[in-house]
Amino acid sequence: MASSSSLFKQLGLTGAGSPLSGRHLLLILLGAGFLAFTVFVVHPNEFRIQSFFAGSCGRPSAEAVAAASPGKAGSVPRATATEAAQAPAPAPDDDGDVRVLIGIQTLPAKYERRHLLRTVYSLQVREHPSLAGRVDVRFVFCNVTSPDDAVFVALEIMRYGDIIVLDCAENMDNGKTYTFFSTVARAFNATRYDYVMKADDDTYLRLPALAASLRGAAREDAYFGLQMPCDRENFYPFPPFMSGMGYALSWDLVAWVAASDLARREQDGPEDMWTGRWFNLAGKAKNRYDQAPRMYNYKGASPDSCFRHGFVPDTIAVHMLKDDARWAETLAYFNATAGLPLSGQIYHLPPPAGSRP
Ligand SMILES: *[C@@H]1O[C@H](CO)[C@@H](O)[C@H](O)[C@H]1NC(C)=O
Ligand SMILES: *[C@@H]1O[C@H](CO)[C@@H](O)[C@H](O)[C@H]1NC(C)=O
Ligand SMILES: *[C@@H]1O[C@H](CO)[C@@H](O)[C@H](O)[C@H]1NC(C)=O
């Protein structure tokens, strides 16, 4: 994930539990105008949006709690210009026919995170063999500038073949996402995935749930993820977009991005908001699939909101897994280690939390 901007830091706001980058904040502040900015800085307690960033003020509103409750998403009025379509309930394990390319945006030096994600996703595929060769996970970054990283990344490419190095200078919100989609449109034009997903490297995806949900979605003009604004406090009234934690586009939209003058011109901004903006301006992505409450931020000690709550069994994605402790807790909850062979001889491990009793 991107580091926060200096403005973000000057305001003393930690990003923990918030899907916002410093650029989001800057944009919101500009949008709210100078008066709101003054109120925000001088009297933060009187500015409602502050609760979103600080994640610590008071009780969550009834609306936010309702939005966070499984099965209640449809009952909350969503602040959207386009009605979010509801994906039909998919048949579990019947997801073999959907082809998805998942590009996890990361940085060349984040070897440990890649190692963890490779392990986690390859085990998911091993447990659900129908995903093999259909859900492809790739790691995506811009030009490798360190000569040492160039050697190590070359080894990874030779060994795993799961890295995409884009022709761009490393950045989060200055066109990496545009470069990703337009590169994929050209490089995989023959493969023709049904969907291409952009995901963050602090997002835990449950590939079987993702594939099953995509299977029930339209194959064209489809935009799938956690939709923002998710209530009248969070991102409201900005036009709808899918959170950067992970969103999928149908292949025709990927090809459209690659060919679009609008997308090429308008690359410079918070990547998730800007992707939504391209589609909003161009009248594209008529089929929108809001996956709340199955995609959400890790809760930790923060209050519930429409994008953050505790783990739920039918999760598609958990975001904001910023450190090892959060990953371990998440993997334990979802029984990632339940298949551990029981041999006291050579696996002298304590029983993993959350797995078999
Ligand atoms: C990325 O690296 C390639 C190969 O070294 C170079 O041709 C290209 O100009 C670089 N692009 C950027 C945006 O730095
Ligand atoms: C993909 O291939 C088709 C036909 O082969 C071609 O018309 C189209 O321009 C290609 N798209 C991209 C983005 O390269
Ligand atoms: C994890 O395994 C336990 C024990 O089998 C089960 O009760 C629980 O529902 C599983 N959790 C998830 C998220 O599948």
Image (cartoon, grey):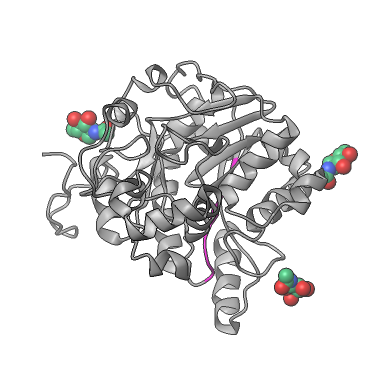
Q: Check the image and report above or below for 125 versus 167.
A: above
- Give the residue furthest to the bottom: 147
The residue at 29%/60% (across/down) is 324
On screen, residue 137 versus residue 41, left or right, reads: right
Residue 94, percent from left and from top: 49, 22
Residue 212, percent from left and from top: 48, 26
Residue 151, percent from left and from top: 58, 78
SS assignment for the magenta stretch, majority: strand
Q: Nearer the viewer, residue 33 or 350?
A: 33
Q: Nearer the viewer, residue 288 or 52?
A: 52
**From which residue to which does the magenta span run?**
101-108
Q: Examine the rendering and report whether any part of residue 187 can be seen.
A: no
The residue at 38%/31% (across/down) is 294
Query: Which quadrant of the view contains residue 315?
Result: top left
| Residue 123 on the magenta segment | no
Q: In the picture, which quadrant includes the C terminus?
A: top left
Q: Nearer the viewer, residue 171 or 109?
A: 171
The residue at 31%/31% (across/down) is 64
The residue at 45%/51% (across/down) is 36
Residue 79, percent from left and from top: 49, 28
Q: Nearer the viewer, residue 235 or 201?
A: 235
